[in-house]
Amino acid sequence: MVQLMTRSVAICLLAQLLACGTTEEVTVLTAEERFQKAMELFEDEDYVEAIDQFSTITLQFQGSTVADDAQFYLGEVRYERHEFLLAAFEYQQLRRNMPASPFVPEAQYKLAMCYYELAPKSALDQQYTVKAMDEFQRLVEYYPESEHAPVAEERITELTDRLARKDYDTARLYATMEYYRAATLYYDSVIEKYHDTEYGRLSYIGKAEVLLERNMLLEARRTLLKFLETEQDEDLRWRAETLLERIEDRL
Protein backbone atom coordinates (compact mmCIF):
# COMPACT_ATOMS: atom_id res chain seq x y z
CA MET A 1 0.00 0.00 0.00
CA VAL A 2 2.86 2.37 0.92
CA GLN A 3 4.65 1.57 -2.30
CA LEU A 4 1.48 2.31 -4.28
CA MET A 5 1.09 5.70 -2.56
CA THR A 6 4.76 6.57 -3.15
CA ARG A 7 4.43 5.69 -6.82
CA SER A 8 1.29 7.81 -7.10
CA VAL A 9 3.02 10.83 -5.54
CA ALA A 10 5.98 10.44 -7.88
CA ILE A 11 3.67 10.28 -10.90
CA CYS A 12 1.87 13.42 -9.77
CA LEU A 13 5.10 15.31 -9.30
CA LEU A 14 6.35 14.22 -12.71
CA ALA A 15 3.09 15.32 -14.29
CA GLN A 16 3.38 18.74 -12.65
CA LEU A 17 6.94 19.17 -13.89
CA LEU A 18 5.96 18.24 -17.42
CA ALA A 19 3.05 20.64 -17.28
CA CYS A 20 5.33 23.45 -16.16
CA GLY A 21 7.77 22.66 -18.95
CA THR A 22 5.07 22.93 -21.57
CA THR A 23 3.58 26.17 -20.31
CA GLU A 24 6.76 28.13 -19.36
CA GLU A 25 7.63 30.75 -21.94
CA VAL A 26 11.18 30.38 -23.28
CA THR A 27 12.75 33.71 -24.21
CA VAL A 28 15.15 33.66 -27.15
CA LEU A 29 16.90 36.95 -27.90
CA THR A 30 17.67 37.96 -31.44
CA ALA A 31 21.17 39.22 -32.27
CA GLU A 32 19.95 42.80 -32.25
CA GLU A 33 18.17 42.40 -28.91
CA ARG A 34 21.21 40.76 -27.38
CA PHE A 35 23.42 43.56 -28.69
CA GLN A 36 21.13 46.16 -27.16
CA LYS A 37 21.34 44.34 -23.84
CA ALA A 38 25.14 44.17 -24.13
CA MET A 39 25.34 47.90 -24.83
CA GLU A 40 23.25 48.66 -21.77
CA LEU A 41 25.64 46.58 -19.69
CA PHE A 42 28.60 48.35 -21.29
CA GLU A 43 27.19 51.78 -20.55
CA ASP A 44 26.47 50.72 -16.98
CA GLU A 45 30.14 49.62 -16.73
CA ASP A 46 29.08 46.04 -16.05
CA TYR A 47 31.97 44.93 -18.19
CA VAL A 48 32.14 41.26 -17.28
CA GLU A 49 28.52 40.63 -18.27
CA ALA A 50 28.96 42.83 -21.36
CA ILE A 51 31.87 40.66 -22.48
CA ASP A 52 29.68 37.56 -22.20
CA GLN A 53 26.94 39.12 -24.31
CA PHE A 54 29.23 40.54 -27.00
CA SER A 55 31.12 37.23 -27.17
CA THR A 56 27.85 35.32 -27.62
CA ILE A 57 26.98 37.50 -30.60
CA THR A 58 30.38 37.02 -32.27
CA LEU A 59 30.14 33.25 -31.80
CA GLN A 60 26.46 32.50 -32.44
CA PHE A 61 25.42 35.34 -34.76
CA GLN A 62 28.45 35.77 -36.99
CA GLY A 63 26.38 36.67 -40.03
CA SER A 64 24.18 39.23 -38.29
CA THR A 65 24.19 42.96 -38.90
CA VAL A 66 25.58 43.58 -35.42
CA ALA A 67 28.42 41.06 -35.50
CA ASP A 68 31.04 43.68 -36.31
CA ASP A 69 29.54 46.03 -33.72
CA ALA A 70 29.91 43.33 -31.10
CA GLN A 71 33.48 42.57 -32.15
CA PHE A 72 34.43 46.24 -31.94
CA TYR A 73 32.87 46.66 -28.52
CA LEU A 74 34.65 43.59 -27.24
CA GLY A 75 37.78 45.63 -27.86
CA GLU A 76 36.22 48.66 -26.22
CA VAL A 77 35.32 46.72 -23.07
CA ARG A 78 38.84 45.37 -22.79
CA TYR A 79 40.26 48.84 -23.38
CA GLU A 80 38.10 50.36 -20.65
CA ARG A 81 39.32 47.64 -18.29
CA HIS A 82 42.94 48.53 -19.24
CA GLU A 83 43.42 45.02 -20.61
CA PHE A 84 45.36 46.44 -23.52
CA LEU A 85 46.79 43.22 -24.94
CA LEU A 86 43.36 41.59 -24.97
CA ALA A 87 41.85 44.75 -26.44
CA ALA A 88 44.50 44.75 -29.17
CA PHE A 89 43.59 41.16 -30.02
CA GLU A 90 39.89 42.02 -30.34
CA TYR A 91 40.58 45.03 -32.58
CA GLN A 92 42.85 42.90 -34.74
CA GLN A 93 40.08 40.29 -35.04
CA LEU A 94 37.76 42.95 -36.42
CA ARG A 95 40.38 44.20 -38.87
CA ARG A 96 41.25 40.69 -40.01
CA ASN A 97 37.80 39.09 -40.21
CA MET A 98 35.58 42.06 -41.05
CA PRO A 99 37.74 44.42 -43.14
CA ALA A 100 34.69 46.09 -44.72
CA SER A 101 33.24 47.13 -41.37
CA PRO A 102 32.88 50.90 -40.82
CA PHE A 103 34.40 50.31 -37.39
CA VAL A 104 37.79 49.36 -38.86
CA PRO A 105 39.35 52.88 -38.96
CA GLU A 106 38.38 53.48 -35.33
CA ALA A 107 39.60 50.01 -34.38
CA GLN A 108 42.91 50.75 -36.12
CA TYR A 109 43.36 53.86 -34.00
CA LYS A 110 42.43 52.07 -30.77
CA LEU A 111 44.78 49.20 -31.66
CA ALA A 112 47.62 51.70 -31.94
CA MET A 113 46.54 53.27 -28.65
CA CYS A 114 46.69 49.86 -26.95
CA TYR A 115 50.37 49.54 -27.82
CA TYR A 116 50.90 53.20 -26.95
CA GLU A 117 49.53 52.55 -23.47
CA LEU A 118 51.81 49.54 -23.13
CA ALA A 119 54.91 51.40 -24.34
CA PRO A 120 57.32 52.02 -21.43
CA LYS A 121 59.72 54.85 -20.70
CA SER A 122 62.75 55.15 -22.97
CA ALA A 123 65.11 53.21 -20.70
CA LEU A 124 63.08 50.00 -20.97
CA ASP A 125 62.40 47.52 -23.76
CA GLN A 126 60.61 49.29 -26.59
CA GLN A 127 58.84 46.49 -28.47
CA TYR A 128 55.42 48.00 -27.83
CA THR A 129 56.68 51.44 -28.81
CA VAL A 130 57.63 50.02 -32.21
CA LYS A 131 54.28 48.25 -32.52
CA ALA A 132 52.42 51.46 -31.64
CA MET A 133 54.38 53.42 -34.25
CA ASP A 134 53.63 50.80 -36.89
CA GLU A 135 49.90 50.88 -36.15
CA PHE A 136 49.73 54.69 -36.03
CA GLN A 137 51.58 54.77 -39.36
CA ARG A 138 49.09 52.29 -40.80
CA LEU A 139 46.24 54.56 -39.73
CA VAL A 140 47.83 57.59 -41.39
CA GLU A 141 48.50 55.69 -44.61
CA TYR A 142 45.21 53.81 -44.97
CA TYR A 143 42.81 56.27 -43.35
CA PRO A 144 44.28 59.76 -43.89
CA GLU A 145 40.80 61.31 -43.58
CA SER A 146 40.25 59.84 -40.12
CA GLU A 147 39.70 62.35 -37.35
CA HIS A 148 42.46 60.56 -35.47
CA ALA A 149 45.11 61.00 -38.20
CA PRO A 150 46.56 64.26 -36.74
CA VAL A 151 46.81 62.65 -33.29
CA ALA A 152 48.47 59.60 -34.86
CA GLU A 153 51.11 61.81 -36.47
CA GLU A 154 51.80 63.48 -33.13
CA ARG A 155 52.15 60.10 -31.48
CA ILE A 156 54.58 58.93 -34.17
CA THR A 157 56.78 61.95 -33.50
CA GLU A 158 56.60 61.39 -29.75
CA LEU A 159 57.46 57.70 -30.00
CA THR A 160 60.25 58.34 -32.49
CA ASP A 161 61.82 60.72 -29.96
CA ARG A 162 61.45 58.04 -27.30
CA LEU A 163 63.32 55.49 -29.40
CA ALA A 164 65.98 58.04 -30.29
CA ARG A 165 66.48 58.94 -26.65
CA LYS A 166 66.92 55.29 -25.67
CA ASP A 167 69.80 54.82 -28.12
CA TYR A 168 71.25 58.25 -27.29
CA ASP A 169 71.24 57.50 -23.56
CA THR A 170 72.90 54.17 -24.27
CA ALA A 171 75.62 55.94 -26.26
CA ARG A 172 76.23 58.39 -23.43
CA LEU A 173 76.39 55.54 -20.91
CA TYR A 174 79.05 53.75 -22.98
CA ALA A 175 80.99 57.00 -23.32
CA THR A 176 80.89 57.53 -19.55
CA MET A 177 82.16 53.99 -19.05
CA GLU A 178 84.91 54.73 -21.63
CA TYR A 179 83.60 52.09 -24.03
CA TYR A 180 84.26 54.51 -26.83
CA ARG A 181 83.87 52.17 -29.78
CA ALA A 182 80.42 51.04 -28.60
CA ALA A 183 79.45 54.66 -27.91
CA THR A 184 80.44 55.63 -31.44
CA LEU A 185 78.31 52.86 -32.92
CA TYR A 186 75.26 54.00 -30.95
CA TYR A 187 75.77 57.64 -31.87
CA ASP A 188 76.00 56.59 -35.53
CA SER A 189 72.78 54.63 -35.16
CA VAL A 190 70.92 57.64 -33.76
CA ILE A 191 72.28 59.91 -36.50
CA GLU A 192 71.26 57.46 -39.21
CA LYS A 193 67.78 56.53 -37.94
CA TYR A 194 66.72 59.67 -36.09
CA HIS A 195 68.66 62.48 -37.76
CA ASP A 196 65.66 64.83 -37.71
CA THR A 197 65.16 64.55 -33.93
CA GLU A 198 66.83 66.49 -31.13
CA TYR A 199 68.77 63.38 -30.16
CA GLY A 200 70.00 62.89 -33.70
CA ARG A 201 71.51 66.39 -33.64
CA LEU A 202 72.99 65.93 -30.18
CA SER A 203 74.58 62.69 -31.36
CA TYR A 204 76.84 64.57 -33.79
CA ILE A 205 78.40 66.40 -30.85
CA GLY A 206 78.51 63.27 -28.70
CA LYS A 207 80.19 61.33 -31.48
CA ALA A 208 82.77 64.05 -32.02
CA GLU A 209 83.59 64.08 -28.30
CA VAL A 210 84.13 60.33 -28.32
CA LEU A 211 86.27 60.50 -31.44
CA LEU A 212 88.36 63.17 -29.76
CA GLU A 213 88.89 60.84 -26.81
CA ARG A 214 89.95 58.14 -29.27
CA ASN A 215 92.35 60.63 -30.87
CA MET A 216 90.53 60.25 -34.20
CA LEU A 217 90.85 63.95 -34.84
CA LEU A 218 90.19 64.13 -38.58
CA GLU A 219 87.00 62.08 -38.32
CA ALA A 220 85.85 64.17 -35.35
CA ARG A 221 86.49 67.31 -37.41
CA ARG A 222 84.51 65.94 -40.37
CA THR A 223 81.61 65.03 -38.08
CA LEU A 224 81.33 68.55 -36.70
CA LEU A 225 81.72 70.27 -40.06
CA LYS A 226 78.92 68.15 -41.48
CA PHE A 227 76.77 69.04 -38.49
CA LEU A 228 77.44 72.76 -38.82
CA GLU A 229 76.41 72.75 -42.50
CA THR A 230 72.72 72.56 -41.61
CA GLU A 231 72.33 73.20 -37.87
CA GLN A 232 70.48 76.42 -37.00
CA ASP A 233 70.20 76.20 -33.22
CA GLU A 234 72.60 78.75 -31.72
CA ASP A 235 73.35 76.80 -28.56
CA LEU A 236 74.17 73.60 -30.45
CA ARG A 237 76.25 75.54 -32.96
CA TRP A 238 78.23 77.14 -30.12
CA ARG A 239 78.90 73.75 -28.56
CA ALA A 240 80.02 72.30 -31.89
CA GLU A 241 82.23 75.29 -32.72
CA THR A 242 83.87 75.22 -29.29
CA LEU A 243 84.63 71.52 -29.69
CA LEU A 244 85.89 72.11 -33.20
CA GLU A 245 88.38 74.69 -31.89
CA ARG A 246 89.78 72.13 -29.46
CA ILE A 247 90.19 69.65 -32.28
CA GLU A 248 91.86 72.27 -34.54
CA ASP A 249 94.32 73.03 -31.73
CA ARG A 250 95.18 69.35 -31.42
CA LEU A 251 95.67 69.08 -35.16
Image (cartoon, helix red, strand yellow):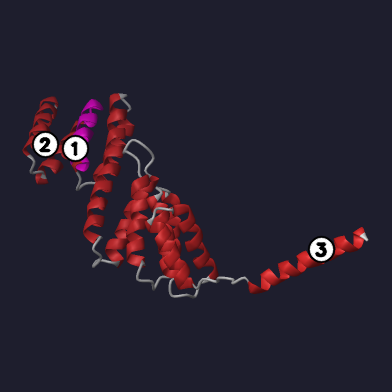
Residue 109 lies, in percent from the top left, at 32, 59
Q: Is residue 159 above or below residue 174?
A: below
Residue 50 lies, in percent from the top left, at 46, 58
Q: CA distance from mark 3 to mark 2?
A: 96 Å
Residue 24 lies, in percent from the top left, at 62, 70
Residue at position x 23%, y 68% in the image: 145
Q: Give the residues in magenta.
A: 199-216
Decide which of 175, 28 is in the foreground and name it. Answer: 28
The residue that label 1 is drawn on is: 202
Specify the quadrant that holds the C terminus: top left
Tell me which amino acid carries mark 2: Leu
Mark 2 and 1 residues: CB-CB less than 8 Å, in contact?
A: yes
Q: Earlier in the sequence, mark 1 or mark 3?
A: 3
The dot on residue 10 is 3
Q: CA distance from mark 2 to mark 1?
A: 8 Å
Circle 3 SS class = helix
Answer with the quarter of the image where residue 225 lies. Answer: top left
Tell me which amino acid carries mark 3: Ala
Circle 2 SS class = helix
The residue that label 2 is drawn on is: 236
- Counting every numbered tag in the picture gives 3
Mark 3 and 2 residues: CB-CB less than 8 Å, in contact?
A: no
Whether residue 18 is in magenta: the answer is no
